[in-house]
Image (spheres, rainbow, N blue to C red):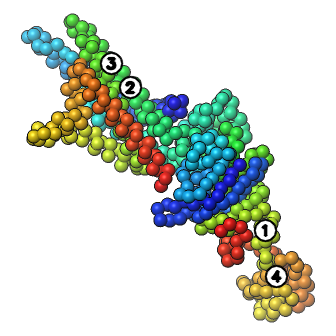
Amino acid sequence: MIKVSGLTKDYGSRRAIHNVSFDAQQGEIVGFLGPNGAGKTTTMRILTGFMPPTDGEAIVAGYDVVEESLEVRKRVGYLPETVPLYNEMIVFDYLKFMGELRDLPNVEERVDEALDMVAMTDRAQGYIGALSKGMRQRIGLAQALLHHPEVLILDEPTIGLDPGQVVEVRELIRQIGKERTVLLSTHLLHEAQNICDRVLIINKGKIVAEDTTENLQARLVGAERVIVRVRGEADRELGLVIKEIKGVRGVELKDEGVVEFEFASGKDLRPEVAKQVIKSGYDLLELRPLGLSLEEIFLELTNSEPRRGN
Amino acid sequence: MKNIWTIAKREYQNYFNSPLAYVIALAIFLPIGIYFSIIMWVSSQQSFYGGPVPEPSPITWLFVFLLIFLAPALTMRLLSDEARMGTLELLLTAPVRDFELVAGKWLGAFLFVMVLAAGTLIFPFIMNQYVSPNLDKIKLISSYIGVILVTAALLALGTGISAIFTNQFAAFFVTLGLYFFLWFMVNLPADWLQNGGDFLNYLSISDHFSQSVNEGTINLGDLVYFLSLTALGLFTGTTAIEIRRWR
């Protein structure tokens, strides 16, 4: 449904994305993961026909985004990152306007249906300007769903939502993703793990990794970092105790009573560490794996050989 | 084509949701009303001594003259505000051609001004009650065709300029400057030039309107002039939107 090859976009002399290639099938939710300014929005804007690429080709829903832009735009639902809405309009009128631009039959029924999907029916007659950020987000989503698009492109769909709404929106995306193609961007790793079938990691305009969430995680967590907290002061001795255990590396004394270390993933050394710490007479308060942050993943990925593309 | 109408309809309704529309309506009807009263009073005084019969053409002239100052306020935000608010992204990713977007915006503003222009028909109507024989219908129709043509041209230029800018005040002042140039300034040097004066006169809106269409004579040249300006404005707008996409 989405096929992108060699996509490049320059803004003046600055190269926003460079030779990006990937594809997404029907019934697949693909996550676009990357830090701010990595090129996520640029790629999405090209795929939605907002702007043409400098180089490369993108086929969305069977049509070329440059040559057959209107056909693409008919089949794509797009939620831009900034969630642009007309504040002076009434919610229902706004969605009706967007529906009319898409030449939908039974526009009003479609609007009701979309409002129902995002649970905003009770605010249909309110002014958009009076809505909270989360509600605006949902109206933006309703707009993207209005025409039952084959491809849904969502730029940071859960940003600014409260936790309850985040769960709801993710559930909604999961539902939609069963039959259609969803491409969503996020800078939250756990969000990508949570809803996406496959993740593309983009950094500085290049795709640095592409894999299923499980594989990516397994591959990324080459080393597991663990924090150990004991009662009282963690002195050098505690560090030495842990260091002596076979397979442990990167021991670091942190705050009072806290030591961090890592071990190669695959063989969990935590029981052994716990045993040794207690045996040495410390009161073990906590032994907890530290998840890799997105920044660490990027460091990892940009330092190691990319698996696919470049 | 349907998209042009959809966009125009929203834009037209939008004017009535904002105080600006009422301010502009006031700024048009108040001066015209006062001017009309003066015309009627003066000609009633002079009619004793066989003075000239009042004509409606000063009313349509004043309407167009006021538009020179007021139309920039109507067109300034048409596309610039969409760009600033980010809603342009919404419209440019909807299945709408760039030209349809620009033409729809223009048409919305045009319809709004046409409602105002229709409102000014009350003045010739009242005038007609006091004049015998009745007003020259052909001349009146010609004046209003002139109003339609000038409005179309001015608003198209304003829409085109609005598409270039993201700041609506920049769009306002550039539009106002262009209108001033085309109304007052373009043919100022025409009298001093040995040749080329005719060409400069041809570029002047006020020559085509005040001295031609508003006085009951519509030449092909006038028609071509106003329609060309309209096309130029819409073309500029469409091109500016396309350039925005490439940037």
Pick the front one: A288 or A6: A6
Marks 3 and 1 close (CB-CB < 8 Å)? no
Marks 2 and 4 close (CB-CB < 8 Å)? no
Name the residue beneath numbered marker 2.
B114
Secondary structure beneath label 1: helix
Name the residue beneath numbered marker 3.
B121
Nearer the observer: mark 1 or 4; the answer is 1
Which residue is at the far left?
B49
Q: Are marks 1 and 4 on the same chain?
A: yes
Residue at (42% x, 47% y) in the render: B240
Does residue A28 sit above or below A261 in this rendering?
Answer: above
Nearer the observer: mark 3 or 1; the answer is 1
Does residue B119 sit above or below A70 in this rendering?
Answer: above
Give the amino acid at mark 1: Gln
Residue at (68% x, 53% y) in the render: A3
Does residue A113 sit above or below A283 in this rendering?
Answer: above
Q: Is residue B214 left or right of residue A57?
A: left
Q: Are marks 3 and 4 on the same chain?
A: no
Residue at (51% x, 45% y) in the render: B88
Name the residue beneath numbered marker 4.
A263
Which of the 4 quarters of the picture holds residue A286?
Answer: bottom right
Q: CA distance from mark 2 to mark 4?
A: 77 Å
Secondary structure beneath label 4: strand
Residue A85 can be seen in this image: no
Label 2 Cα crowd, 10 Å radius (few <14 / some 14-19 / many 20+): some
Marks 3 and 4 close (CB-CB < 8 Å)? no
Label 1 Cα crowd, 10 Å radius (few <14 / some 14-19 / many 20+): some
Give the amino acid at mark 2: Met
